[in-house]
Amino acid sequence: MSPIQNIVILTGAGVSAESGIDTFRDAGGLWEQHRVEDVATPEAFARDPDLVLRFYDMRREAIQTKEPNAAHRALARLDAEWPGELLIITQNVDDLHERAGAKRLLHMHGEHLNAWCTGCDVRSLWTGPLLDRPACSACGVAGHLRPDIVWFGEMPYRMDEIYHALNRADLFVSIGTSGAVYPAAGFVREARAAGARTLELNMEPSQGSYWFDEARHGPATALVPAWVE
Ligand code: BJW
């Protein structure tokens, strides 16, 4: 087997669970408390913007009280020390990877701490509430800001970069994701087809566990540091 040089890591809500951020599909997760179609689609936002903005204002406020955990820190250490190519693709919209120090990081489903002005198409840092329809800091016009989150039916970000990295990967590692949401759920097959070894680190077998060469099950704060060492 040739030595590993290029690593692609996909992370999901399970990596932030032990920081106190709810996952989506676990018992007690966000989708048990809210109907996806009420809060995470462009149609929901068009139908009831107040409901959607209130949901995201609440989550934006909550993540600012959370801290990175041992899994985020281990990945940041790997990022700092790995001499080859490495890309952390996160589906998470929190900022815990970057607060732990990760640099080679890409948010494919957007970021809680960004607002997107659909008037001028500028995305900017936004830590306060959006419900009171503030003005965009770029164009100054009020009423066009929405959470910079990729909702169902919308195109995830930076897909060209992602597929480029997957096609160069020698090792693909999926951490804390259920494998229920596409296109992320298909990355393991893409990387495999390009010849990568594939590893899953998750609390339980994911929906796509069949596609992994190896799977380790347990909490991310134990599995990820142990894998990185
Ligand atoms: C632990 C742990 C611990 C717990 N330690 N582990 C039919 C077939 C195929 C596709 C489709 C279809 N119909 C529609 C689609 C497309 C759709 C889709 O996939 N739907 C499925 C539901 C079927 N996808 C889209 O619409 C996407 N866009 C798209 O496809 O565009 C077209 C396109 C085509 C081709 C190429 C490119 C584009 C957009 C998807 C947007 C997803 N957005 C969300 C919501 C954001 C809003 C918000 O944050 O409020 O993103 S959905 C939600 O799910 C969020 C997450 O990023 C995403 C993934 O969830 P994740 O991270 O896996 O969390 P969970 O909760 O599911 O799993 C957690 C896991 O962790 C579990 O396994 C636990 O066991 C584990 N865990 N604690 C380790 N301590």
Image (tube, rainbow, N blue to C red):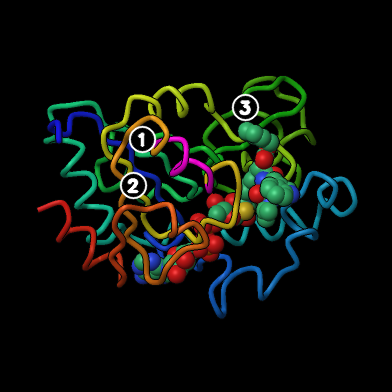
Highlighted magenta segment, given as a residue range = 185-191
Query: For numbered disc 1, what is the local secondary structure?
Result: strand
Residue 113 appears in the figure: yes
Instruction: Answer yes or no: disc 2 within 8 Å of ligand 1.
Output: no
The reply to whether dot 3 and dot 1 touch (C-beta < 8 Å) is no
Where is residue 98? Give x, y as percent: 33, 42
Residue at image position (57%, 60%) is 59
Disc 1 residue type (three-letter): Leu
Disc 2 residue type (three-letter): His
Residue at numbered disc 2: 97
Residue 15, compared with residue 194, is above or below; it is: below
Query: For numbered disc 3, what is the local secondary structure?
Result: loop
- Judge depth for marks 3 and 1 and give the one in front: 1
Where is residue 118? Give x, y as percent: 75, 28
Q: Which numbered disc, 1 or 2, marks the residue that appears first in the sequence?
A: 2
| View extreme (front): residue | 1
Dominant secondary structure, magenta: helix
Q: Is residue 18 left or right of residue 32?
A: left
Residue 216, compared with residue 102, is above or below; it is: below
The reply to whether dot 1 and dot 2 touch (C-beta < 8 Å) is yes
Q: CA distance from mark 2 to mark 3?
A: 26 Å
Displayed quadrant of residue 33 = bottom right
| View extreme (right): residue | 47
Q: Is residue 124 magenta?
A: no
Residue 60 appears in the figure: no
Q: Is residue 143 left or right of residue 126?
A: right
Q: Nearer the viewer, residue 32 or 60?
A: 32
Residue at numbered disc 1: 105
Specify the label residue 137 is tagged with.
Answer: 3
Disc 3 residue type (three-letter): Ser
